[in-house]
Image: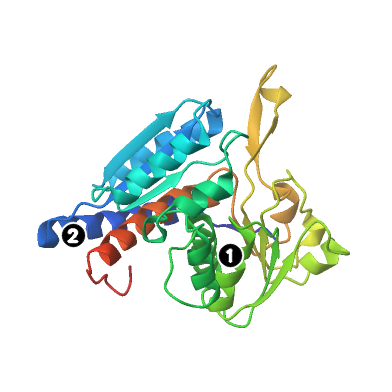
Amino acid sequence: MTATIIDGKIIAAELRARVAVEVARLKKEHGLTPGLAVVLVGNDPASEVYVRNKGIATVEAGMNSFEYKLPAETGEADVLAKVRELNADPAVHGFLVQFPVPDHISQQAVIDAIDPVKDADGLHPLNAGRLASGLPAMVPATPEGCVIMAKRAGGDLSGKHAVIIGRSNLVGKPVAQLLLKENCTVTIAHSRSRDLPSIARQADILVAAVGRPGMVRGDWVKPGAIVIDVGINRVPAPEKGEGKTRLVGDVAFDEASQVAGAITPVPGGVGLMTVACLLRNTVIAACRQNGIALPQDF
């Protein structure tokens, strides 16, 4: 069996197009332009590329983009002051602080300081709690993208067994909550799980989010399963030349694609959906803050 590729480029482009239509409506009917801000502390190369791509996508959707680049030596108090400034800025409807931050800054302190209604990354404990309770919340963009892709590949997910490998607050836990909402039976597995391969083989939907390149082998995959690979890992690529690297996922793609029914590639999969879902989150936040109803299919 050769798996169907779940093409993040196509699905993300469709979502970004819907966002652009909604942004145009908000401008025309309400005089409202959603604004997304990103704070980057330090000079992490991967983060710089990601922030630049977010900015380009935000502008292309017709939204306002704000970027704040702070030196790596910026103190935690100054970062928190910038967060409070954005909380109070009416032009900013959603924002995030790009992680990782330098070691002297508490990631959790930053998350806790963000106004939950502007929490574009959906990481504030209030949003996490509301998501777990089945209440309206700001939802983390990457998990949202994972579920959209799984539904594109599998249609109605009700009754399917979803196995998530990874229990992070950023992906593992929220994607579990979203799949529960889709009426899946959900198992969260992790590095301490006994006989991880046999747990993975039970999955109709297998989500890999562990940050270990090629960890999920082909014989971990149930024939016909939907495989969502969240991993973005840079590994040496000597075939490209000395010092060159390439991006790979947490799934051994060549092996898994011979067994799975559908699979996301890396690159070209979940990463593209993350940006599109972040734009969607910002529009949702802008509407909630201004008491504006969104179309049901948005």
User: Mark 1 is on which residue type?
Assistant: Val
In the picture as drawn, the residue positioned furthest to the front comes out as: 77
Residue 12: image location, x then y, percent: 42, 53
Q: Is residue 138 above or below residue 65?
A: below
Q: Is residue 151 above or below residue 271?
A: below
Residue occupying the point 61% across, 58% down:
169
* Horizontal side of residue 292 vs 170, given as left or right: left
Circle nearer the N terminus (1, 2): 2
For label 1, count other residues whose C-alpha is less than 10 Å away and answer few (under 14), some (14-19) or many (20+).
many
Residue occupying the point 53% across, 65% down:
128
Residues at badges 1 and 2 in contact (C-beta under 8 Å)? no
Residue 92: image location, x then y, percent: 29, 48
Which corner quadrant holds the N terminus? Answer: bottom right
Residue 70: image location, x then y, percent: 44, 29
Tag shown at residue 108: none
Tag shown at residue 26: 2
Q: Does dot 1 land on a helix, a strand or a loop?
A: helix
User: Mark 2 is on which residue type?
Assistant: Leu
Residue occupying the point 29% across, 66% down:
288
Residue 69: image location, x then y, percent: 41, 30
Mark-to-mark CA distance, 1 and 2: 29 Å
As rendered, which of 16 and 238 lies closer to the eye?
Answer: 16
User: For mark 1, what is the residue?
Assistant: 175
Colour convention of the picture: rainbow
